[in-house]
Image (tube, grey):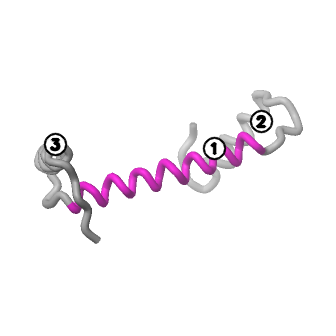
């Protein structure tokens, strides 16, 4: 795949490639794409959570249960 960029964008990509320690501009662009895909996946999860119905009010007991579930088997506490 080839991507054409105006000179100003190419200069910006080259500057970021060097400043952030990427070996090539392709590595920098791939990282940007990966981050965008991660953001999209997170957005989908947030939208899914927002759309789900909450059957009961959130209480300290709810948070305790979530903490227990999140730390079960990890040996850490929150």
Crowding at dot 3, Cα within 10 Å, few <14 / some 14-19 / many 20+, comes out as few
Q: Which residue is mark 2?
A: 62
Q: Is residue 22 above or below residue 58?
A: below
Residue at 39% x, 51% y: name it.
35
Residue at horizontal 79%, vertical 33%?
61
**Which tag, 2 or 3, sits closer to the chain's start?**
3
Q: CA distance from mark 1 to mark 3?
A: 35 Å
Check contact, mark 2 vs mark 1: CB within 8 A: no
- Residue matched to label 3: 8
Residue 30 location in percent, x, y? 30, 60
Query: Which mark, residue 46?
Result: 1
Residue 42 relative to residue 47: left or right:
left
Indicate the position of residue 27 as horizontal and vertical percent values. Answer: 23, 60
Left or right of 32 in this view: 24? left
Quadrant of the image containing the N terminus = bottom left
As measured in the structure, the alpha-carbon distance from the residue carrying label 2 to the one carrying label 1 is 19 Å
Point out the tag, 1 or 3, that comes first from the N-terminus. Answer: 3
Q: Is residue 46 magenta?
A: yes
Q: Residues within 10 Å of mark 2 (few under 14, many from 20)?
A: few
Query: Residue sitting at 64 percent across and 52 percent down?
Result: 72
Q: Which numbered disc flags the more N-terminal residue, 2 or 1?
A: 1
Is 28 situated left or right of 57 in this image? left
Residue located 46% across and 55% down the image: 37
């Amino acid at each position: 795949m080839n991507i054409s960029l105006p000179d100003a964008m190419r200069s910006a990509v080259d500057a970021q490639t060097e400043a952030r320690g990427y070996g090539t501009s392709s590595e920098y662009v791939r990282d940007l794409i990966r981050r965008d895909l991660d953001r999209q996946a997170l957005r989908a999860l947030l939208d899914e959570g927002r759309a789900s119905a909450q059957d009961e009010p959130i209480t300290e007991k709810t948070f305790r249960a979530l903490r227990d579930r999140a730390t079960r088997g990890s040996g850490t506490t929150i």
